[in-house]
Image (cartoon, rainbow, N blue to C red):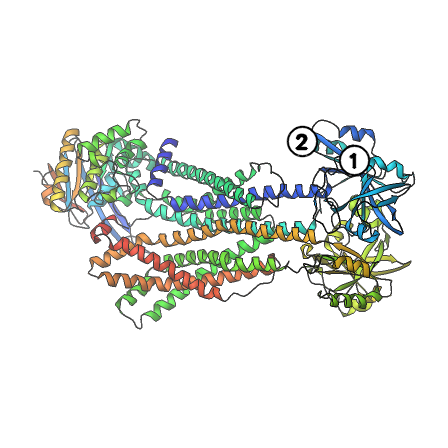
Amino acid sequence: MLRLALRMLLRDWRAGELRVLALGLVLAAGSVASVAFFADRVRQALTREAHQVLGADVLLSADHEWSSEFRDAAAVPGLRRAESASFVSMARTGDEALLASVKAVTPGYPLRGALRTAPDLNSPDAVADGVPDAGSVWLDERMMAALKARPGDSMELGRARFRVAAVLTLEPDRGVSFMNFAPRVMMRSDDLPATGLVQPQSRISYQLLVAGESQAIQRFEQWARTRLGRGERIDSLENARPEVRAGLDRAQSFLGLAAMLSVILSAVAVALGARRYTERHLDGYAVMRCMGAAQSQLFALFAWEFLLLGLLASLAGCALGFLVQNVVAWSLASLIPGTLPQPGSAPLAQGTATGLVLLLGFALPPLLRLQGVPAQRVIRRDIDGPRRGAFAVYVVGLAAAFALLRWQAGEPKLAAVVFGGFVASFAIFAALAYVTLRLVGRLGRVGGGVSWRYGLASLLRRPRSNAVQIVAIAVGLTAVLLLTLIRADLLEAWRRRLPPDAPDRFLVNIQPEQRGALAEFFRRNGVKQPQTFPMVRARLVSVNGRPVSAQDYSDERAKRQVEREFNLTYLSELPPDNRIAEGAWFGGKDLQSGAFSVEHWVAERLGIRLGDRLEFLAAGRSFAAPVTSVRKLEWDSMRPNFFFIATPSLVEGFPASYVASFHSPPGDARLTLRLSQAFPNLTVVDVGVVLRQVQTVMNQLIAAVQLVFVFALAAGVLVLYAALLATQDERTHEAAVMRALGASRRQVLSAQRAEFAVLGAIAGALGSLGATAIGWALATRVFELEFVWNGWIWLAGPALGLACVVLNAWAGARAALGRPPMVALREGV
Amino acid sequence: MVEATGLSKVVRLANGTPGANELVILQDISLEVMPGEAVAIVGASGSGKSTLLGLLAGLDTPSSGAVRLDGSDLFSLDEDGRAALRARLLGFVFQSFQLLPALNALENVMLPLELAGKADASDQAREMLKRVGLAERLRHYPKTLSGGEQQRVALARAFVTRPKLLLADEPTGNLDAATGAAVIDLMFELNAEGGTTLLLVTHDDAIASRCARKVRLVAGRIDGEAGP
């Protein structure tokens, strides 16, 4: 049976009966697999990226030196280790003194990522060779500028004297945390005892960095977790680089969308392909029944044939997906440092499952029809089998498809919008198509020539199959329009989020009275005036009257956060890039009586809910108010973001400094230096490197997303092709009948043209409608981007629709008219 | 070989009360065909010829009556049982050829053997196609064959299983006279070679007269039988 099924598969394939079906499956499996492969690798890239942020694969921190037990455990084969100690101390050169954040490192540091140094300020930097030599230190740019130091100068730290050897330009594990305000001095840990700064009471943070093969690392991490003592912790990778992560998340959503579109479209193509296959095999099935094949035998034969087809097509799709994914990974090579381990085999299963589910859900119902075909059909061909159970199977198929989408998208909302959009589109398209057909049919009888009337009449003669065709073409066009015009708009809106003049410098610690002078400085230097935010440092002391203490939280980060002061701002307007997730932004009553708005991550971590009463302590005074909203932030906006926003009335009286971000004009490299000389108390945080990285990431991700969209586009075109093919047999036969009845070539052609023109125009308009609606829903509901109304789509849709059907009419007519009518008639429907 | 007794086929029309809106297609047909005999069923369009053929092959079920095929009571079997019987006994030739469009000539002929699980399907089918004069056309698809060639492929497919009974439904209905005659000649040759019983439905008296016996149907009843 299996052998025969395989033979039948090969024969059907060779005869071109399975092309649409197989292509649909290949595209569905391919897009799902490529996105899954890609997601796999992006996850790995992200982890690697995050490891750079740690400088290691596992980072252990403690408030005391690490015991030899831990050190030895990290010294096994397959692992590398390094250590660092960080503390704050005064650094002096000549007359200048500055509080520095000192980091003493052992050779080998960092284990992941690399330090970069430059021989002098404003000279090009390069990857550093190891760590500072004995007796020498590296200073970051801010330290150099503030101490007015030059390489070769000497610097005092504690009781020891060091030579300034280089400018430290990049420290991968430093991030842009506002907590690291003090400028950096990097030294060798061997030199630490000489400074005399390591005393029992000094606040030093000790890090043990470990890196190595993933299995050895996992073993080590598991081992370490069970042995952590007081004041010891393992730093997690979660929340590393939120700004890069936000971009990746968005890209993942886009990729998920592309894969979902391909799956839906492929489902349509598979259903259409299976329908055509069934129509063309009804007779053959009946013949085989005459030859004495049992129902069960034939069903098994077809089932095996389709299962084999499904498997082969899905595997081909996975192979294609793997290929595409490699291209994507290659195009992202500069984003992903080093060579990535090959992706796992899970995407293979995912792609194959997709193909088989589609086949089951959308090819089975038409196939079930075969089973009901009476053998009598060979003698009386008008006999058709009952269509039993097809609806139930379609429902199962739809449910399976939705589960597939849900799995694929990873987020229920995106899946719901896309799936709901398409299902609603199907229903609305079908209703509109049917009504329009009737309307056009009625109006069309009033005037026009014979061909025109005949063409319109034939529209009405098969309202159901024509409506099906219109819906299929409209769905195909929806996808094509969505993937061309709307996609471009969406990606543009994404790109606009981070324009070339996005802020790349943060200014912290602006005093209230400095704001005027600062504005004047910016005006003189031709820099766009930045928006300044007041900042009050305050401790969270109680939630709903219950005192807050670090012991209440198991999460290390939450512990650290409540031990420190938060930066609060006060505003009456919701800042851009903030979105209310729960509750409502400050109303008139809130502004009077006082209220807080909390960022949703920190709310989650600290267990703060809407309506909770928060009490903060600042400058020895406390203030309290309820939480009236929870906000979500756009971490990739590169603007100052605040965990807590208070109403102005609540905190206006407290001492505040201001924070601002601005875009430093290119070509004015010394602006930052002039700024810190003019306002020595200001801290300038240069996030240019981070910003450029985020921009690069975004551009590369957009390129990758585009590539994967090609799959969906191909699936859309396939649906169009399948839709047009669906009625081709019927039309060929009809044209032959007309010819046989004495119609001229011209009459046949213009009758078909009239029919197709109406068909194409309706489908095109519906496609435009669908694409606009789905595009709007995606922009506003899912991606939270601005929706741009695209007028072109209303021209492009009908034009494309017409082009498709005209092309098809031409091809179909050629097929119909290219042979003597007798041949076409004899071949039957 | 074939023995039909009291076969009737009545179709109830839509929403009809029994009796009032019934269409009698066949009424009380009794017919016996001996092994090796060639019988033509003739009659005008709508006389019930094709329905009778369908019943004799067990493709359809009668309203009343019975059919014995090679000793087996056809309608005491279920549909799959009848299919198994067909596989063992019958060959078919249809007016519209009914070749599978996705299969080439050779594969069409191989199909019944393959369905029966025969190992040397390809050799037997080649042999048969050679016999009907299409050795050069093995790889041709039906749509690239002429009508006469298609019907010859159909004959090869019908005879390749060495059936005891060949049922032919207007085998020349879609062919011009000359081609039709050649196909009929071939059919009778194959029939004679295999000692096959032949049951032929036609409205062409010339073809019918080549059969040993003619059964005429008029409005669903046997109107008369005639020998050669």
Q: Position of residue A395 (x, y in %)?
A: 49, 49
Q: Earlier in the sequence, mark 1 or mark 2?
A: 1
Mark yes or no: residue A786 visible: yes
Please identify the quadrant where the N terminus of chain A is shown.
Answer: top left
Judged from the image, the secondary structure of the residue bearing numbered disc 1 is loop
Q: Position of residue A737 (x, y in %)?
A: 23, 56
Residue topped by disc 2: A215
Is A823 left, or right, of A355 in this rendering?
Answer: left
Which chain is home to disc 2?
A
Judged from the image, the secondary structure of the residue bearing numbered disc 2 is helix
Which chain is home to disc 1?
A
**Which residue is most to the bottom?**
A446
Q: Position of residue A627 (x, y in %)?
A: 78, 59
Residue at horizontal 79%, vertical 68%? A591
Q: Nearer the viewer, residue B42 or A706?
A: A706
Would you call the spot at circle 2 few (<14 residues within 10 Å), some (14-19), or many (20 or more)?
Answer: few
Residue topped by disc 1: A106
Q: Is residue A589 above or below residue A223?
A: below
Report the mark closest to the observer, 1 or 2.
1
* Among the 4 quarters of the image, the one containing residue A731: bottom left
Question: What amino acid does circle 2 point to?
Answer: Gln
Q: Is residue B37 above or below residue A102?
A: above
